[in-house]
Image: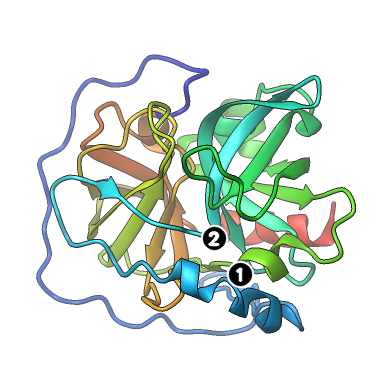
Amino acid sequence: MRARRRSGRHAASRAAAWFTRPAGRLTVVGTLTVGVVVTVTPANGAATDIASHVAKAVRGLVTTSENSQVVGDTPAVGALFSISQGKLGTHFCTASVVSSPHGDLAITAAHCVTGTGMPATIAFVPGYHSGTQPYGVWIVSRIYVDPAWNSTSNQDDDVAFLKLSQSGASAPIEDVTGAETLATKTTAKQMVEVIGYPDSSEQPVGCRNWTSEPMANQLEFDCGGYTNGTSGGPFLADVNPATGQGVVVGVIGGYDQGGFTPAVSYSSEFSANVANLYATAIAGG
């Protein structure tokens, strides 16, 4: 697995799976109906605040490769930190802001944030790199995970939504960083960019490759360098090279809590369970 707090994963890794046809564009609808893509738009007024960050966000797509490389500023993707006595500890997982009506949600892997104590002991630092906090520190005020994960740690439900807040903030995090779009029930074979924060690095790494479906309800992404700490990192399809933002179709987690080797990563497939969990997080239930 890719979160430092836990240990022990299956030692076997699958052979690389490659696809030559490009993924189709995602069908966009504004509904939570089971079996379709779920998408929302940024909160009103977000464009003005985000515009000032666009120049920083322009980093281009990393090339398709067998190994990850350090990527530049990623405003909507950041590191999860422990908090002790009001101070940041070490970063241990990755999360990304997702569009929502209230603009205050991020997505990560459930195994990153269960068994960690109270939500207020975790902070999200978007765009974190080399000790800097370009978009501030946001406290996790509530964690949403599927009941199936709480009861059995089902690998098909290794997804969590985080409600974020910041003392004195005049706008939600989405207005500051922009956000990725959430999608469910997408094709298992598509080109994605995966971003994560290794424990041993103060900068995020990224890589592009095709996904595959090695087993039911799981996605596989093959690229080296995704070590502990990259859990929760988003699988981003249709990334806009001007903003670095894309469509979240998975997060590092699922089978073996993300994978046993740094070269093979997994994600729970986003289906009705994730759509329902997202609806719960929006409603604040």
Mark 2 neighbour class, 10 Å CA radius: few under 14, some 14 to 19, many 20 or more: many
Determine the CA span between mark 1 and mark 2.
Answer: 7 Å
Vertical relation: 124 (above or below) 30: above
For this view, does 268 lie left or right of residue 182? left
Q: Nearer the viewer, residue 3 or 58?
A: 58
Quarter location, residue 239: bottom left
Secondary structure beneath label 1 = loop
Name which residue lies at 84% across and 55% down. 284
Quarter location, residue 273: bottom right
Q: Nearer the viewer, residue 184 or 176?
A: 176
User: Is residue 158 visible in this depiction of the protein?
Assistant: no
Residue type, mark 2 in image = Pro
Quadrant placement of the N terminus: top left
Name which residue lies at 75% across and 59% down. 104
Q: Position of residue 218 (x, y in %)?
A: 36, 47
User: Is residue 186 visible in this depiction of the protein?
Assistant: yes
Which label number is shown at residue 43? none
The answer to the question of whether label 1 and label 2 lie on touching residues, with beta carbons closer than 8 A, is yes
Disc 1 target residue: 178
Colour style of the rendered protein structure: rainbow
Disc 2 target residue: 75
Residue type, mark 1 in image = Gly
Name which residue lies at 62% across and 45% down. 125
Vertical relation: 273 (above or below) 155: below
Q: Who comes first in sequence, dot 1 or dot 2?
A: 2
Total labels: the figure holds 2
Name which residue lies at 85% across and 58% down. 169
Q: Nearer the viewer, residue 30 or 113?
A: 113
For this view, does 40 lie left or right of residue 168? left
Q: Position of residue 85 (x, y in %)?
A: 80, 19
